[in-house]
Image (spheres, rainbow, N blue to C red):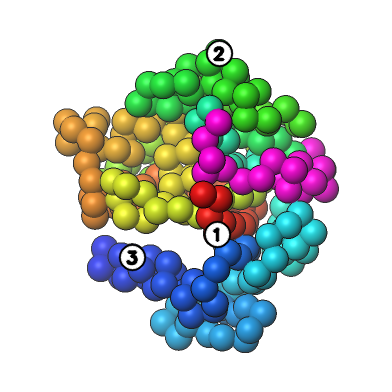
Amino acid sequence: MKITRRKFIKTAGMITASAGIIGVGDFISGCSAEDKNLSNADEKIIPEIAEKSKVYFTKKIDSEHLIKLYQKINSEITGKVAIKLHSGEPHGPNILPRDMVQKFQSQIPNSTIIEANTAYGGARANTASHRQTLETNGWTFCPVDIIDAEGDVNFPVKGGFHLEEVAMGSHLTNYDSMIVLTHFKGHTMGGFGGSLKNIAIGCASGKEGKLQVHGVRKFGSWVTGERLMELMTDSGKAICDHFGKKIVFLNVLLRRQ
């Protein structure tokens, strides 16, 4: 289905607003790329996106409920599995609880956490310092693949707003399926973050792809607002097209400060 710019921004806003409809507070939701109806534990429906996705919801944030949600949407997840999450800046508070992720990951056969280097400098700008940050933040209980440690590979963008291809971490092609495990937050430059930012920027290579998604390569400077959201949509579509049915989304809304 063709999605217009106006429709995308409107739908994104409704998805974010849904937290207020189904109950204020922390929660986990899960959906797959192929589900067709929106539902949750309280049986409340958001009309305009009801035909798009089936969303399962719980107010309990722990490994048990995370695993239960995953089991409702994992029918297409097979082979070598990438778990894409945000591992955080050193000692950064805005990351998922490691013990919850550890218990979750242990239930996913042949799975690996994946990350990519950053484009803005700092402790995750190169593979060596990034690995030190992973250790500092406690991501030591399973393999973590820095997917652009050996460069990048271009993923095509079919019918994008601005991009025809995006440079993703080259190791991404080693995986058959992807679990997008997101600590759902906003984005200071774009307004919306969540699962879209997790894959669109998070899988793009630090040296090239992230600069493409931030508009540097096409517009000459780091863009913000609607244009950044469109660029992220292009990149996110490239990821979803690549994995097809073999991608699922788990979002954790959790304030840790």
For residue 243, say whether it is visible. Answer: yes
> Residue at image x 41%, y 72%?
17
Is residue 212 a member of the stretch shown in magenta? no
The span shown in magenta is 91-110
Q: Nearer the viewer, mark 1 or mark 3?
A: 1
- SS state under label 1: strand
**Corner quadrant of residue 10:** bottom left
Q: Nearer the viewer, mark 1 or mark 2?
A: 1
Disc 1 from disc 2: Cα separation: 30 Å
Q: Is residue 39 depicted above or below 229 in this figure?
A: below
Residue 100: horizontal and vertical position, in percent? 73, 48
- The mark that comes first in sequence, 3 or 2, is 3
**Corner quadrant of residue 250:** bottom right
Q: Using the image as rendered, state which of residue 238 and residue 88 is in the foreground.
A: 88
Q: Using the image as rendered, state which of residue 5 and residue 97 is in the foreground.
A: 97
The residue labelled by disc 2 is 128
Q: Is residue 171 depicted above or below 33 in this figure?
A: above
Q: Main secondary structure of the magenta part?
A: loop
User: What's under tag 1, amino acid-wise?
Assistant: Leu
Residue 72: horizontal and vertical position, in percent? 74, 67
Q: Which mark is residue 8?
A: 3
> Residue at image x 79%, y 38%?
110
The residue labelled by disc 1 is 253
**Corner quadrant of residue 135:** top right
User: What's under tag 3, amino acid-wise?
Assistant: Phe
Residue 242: horizontal and vertical position, in percent? 53, 46
- SS state under label 2: helix
Is residue 104 a member of the stretch shown in magenta? yes
Residue 19: horizontal and vertical position, in percent? 49, 71
* Cβ atoms under marks 1 and 3 closer than 8 Å: no
- SS state under label 3: helix
> Residue at image x 41%, y 21%?
122
